[in-house]
Image (tube, helix red, strand yellow):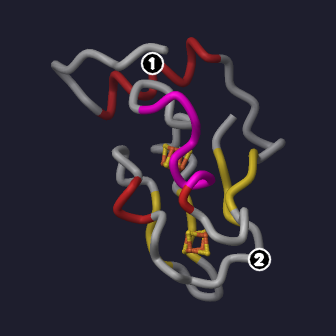
Amino acid sequence: MAYRISADCEKCGSCEPECENQAISEGGETYVIDPERCTECIGNYKEPRCFEVCPVAAPERDPERKETKEQLLEKWRKLHPGKEPKLF
Ligand code: SF4
Ligand code: SF4
């Protein structure tokens, strides 16, 4: 399930450099996550980094984007050709 950023986002910018999939960018009212690049941090970290670094817990699971761990890993492999994912 990809993450999204709720309206609680205060646009501090802390999450953007933490995403190894380059899924986060500055949007209008909030920072935004590209669901085509978000793997819930599968392949990179044990827990979603954007949620961990966010001071207001704005990143959340997007219920509209249900994906299995296998689908998220496949997405990761397409984003990082030739690399091996970190598995936890
Ligand atoms: S959950 Fe991980 S992959 Fe998804 S946007 Fe946040 S930091 Fe990036
Ligand atoms: S860390 Fe949280 S408050 Fe800061 S830009 Fe990201 S989602 Fe918004």
Q: Which residues are magenta?
A: 45-52
Closer to us: 25 or 9? 9
**Magenta stretch containing residue 41, yes or no?**
no
Element carrying mark 1: helix
Judged by depth in the image, the label closer to the viewer, 1 or 2, is 2
Spatial CA distance of label 1 from label 2 is 30 Å
Point out the image quarter for the N terminus.
top right
Residue bearing the label numbered 1: 74
Disc 1 residue type?
Answer: Glu
Which residue sits at x=40%, y=51%?
19
In x, y percent, where is residue 87? 43, 14
Whether 36 is drawn above or below 68: the answer is below
In x, y percent, where is residue 46? 52, 28
Name the image quarter holding residue 82.
Answer: top left
In x, y percent, where is residue 23? 44, 54
Residue bearing the label numbered 2: 8
